[in-house]
Image: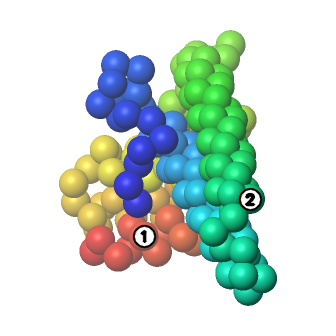
C-alpha cells in the first residue's frame, strides 16, 4: 500500500510509533476506498449517459466534478480525523499515575487489541534476536494472554514462524 494521505518524511510524521503507523495505514485504506467509490460512481454515470445517448452532455461533466469534490471533502475529513487521532494517541501514550506506558511494566489498556498486538510484537522483537528464546518468553508471558485477547494465538503463530 502506498501511503499518500500524509507525507511520512515531514517533521510532523517522521517519528511515528507502530500504533500511529497503524492509524496512518487505516486512514490510507479509507482514502483508497473513497477514491475507488468515486471512480465507480463516475463510471456508472458515464454508462448511464451513454445508454441514453447523452454522453456528450455537460451534465456528465458536472456530475463527475460533483463526485470528485465529494471525494475530496471525504478525504479531507479522513485526514483531519487522522491528525486528531495521532495527536490524541501521542498525548495518551505518555502514561498514567503508574508512570509511562510500556509493556509489560505498565501496559496501556486504552489501546485497541490490534494496537496492543503491535506494541507486544515490538516489545518481543526488541527483547532478543534469538527467535526460539523470543517464542519461549512469549509462551511464558501470562499478561499477554489477557492483554492480547483473541490476538494471543496470532502473536504466538507469528513468533513461531520466525523459528
Q: Residue at x 39, y 67 (%)?
A: 159
Say if 81 sits above or below 58 in the image: above
* x, y percent for residue 105: 54, 32
Q: Residues within 10 Å of mark 2 (few under 14, many from 20)?
A: few
Are the residues flagged by discs 2 and 1 in contact, CB closer than 8 Å? Answer: no
Say if 35 sits above or below 122 in the image: below
31 relative position to 120: left or right = right
**Residue 53 visible from this viewpoint:** yes
Question: What residue occupies the far bottom of the structure in this picture?
Answer: 51
Q: Which residue is drawn at 48% across and 69% down?
A: 156
Residue at the spot of label 2: 59
Return the disc, 2 or 1, that comes first in the chain's sequence: 2
Q: Which colour scheme appears in the figure? A: rainbow
> What is the total number of numbered labels drawn onto the structure image?
2
* x, y percent for residue 91: 61, 17
Quarter of the image where one finds residue 10: top left
Q: Is mark 2 on a helix, strand or loop?
A: helix
Q: Which residue is drawn at 69% across and 64% down?
A: 57
Marks 2 and 1: which is nearer the front? 2
Say if 99 sits above or below 152 in the image: above
Front-most of residues 43 and 72? 43
* x, y percent for residue 89: 61, 27
* x, y percent for residue 83: 59, 27
Q: Residues within 10 Å of mark 1 (few under 14, many from 20)?
A: few
Q: What element carries label 1?
A: helix
Quadrant for the N terminus, please: bottom left
Quarter of the image where one finds residue 14: top left
Q: Residue at x 28, y 74 (%)?
A: 163
Question: What residue occupies the far left of the structure in this picture?
Answer: 129
57 relative position to 159: left or right = right
Residue at the spot of label 1: 158
Disc 2 to disc 1, C-alpha distance: 53 Å
Amino acid at each position: 500500500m502506498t501511503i499518500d494521505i500524509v507525507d511520512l518524511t515531514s517533521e510532523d510524521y517522521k517519528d511515528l510509533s507502530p500504533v500511529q503507523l497503524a492509524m496512518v495505514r487505516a486512514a490510507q485504506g479509507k482514502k483508497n476506498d473513497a477514491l475507488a467509490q468515486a471512480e465507480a460512481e463516475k463510471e456508472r454515470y458515464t454508462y448511464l449517459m451513454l445508454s441514453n445517448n447523452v454522453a456528450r452532455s455537460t451534465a456528465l461533466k458536472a456530475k463527475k466534478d460533483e463526485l470528485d469534490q465529494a471525494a475530496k471533502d471525504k478525504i479531507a475529513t479522513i485526514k483531519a480525523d487522522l491528525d486528531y487521532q495521532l495527536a490524541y494517541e501521542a498525548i495518551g501514550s505518555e502514561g498514567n499515575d503508574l508512570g509511562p506506558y510500556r509493556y509489560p511494566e505498565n501496559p496501556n489498556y486504552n489501546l485497541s487489541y490490534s494496537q496492543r498486538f503491535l506494541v507486544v510484537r515490538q516489545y518481543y522483537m526488541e527483547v532478543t534476536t534469538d527467535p526460539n528464546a523470543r517464542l519461549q518468553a512469549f509462551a511464558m508471558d501470562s499478561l499477554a494472554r489477557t492483554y492480547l485477547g483473541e490476538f494471543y494465538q496470532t502473536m504466538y503463530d507469528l513468533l513461531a514462524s520466525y523459528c
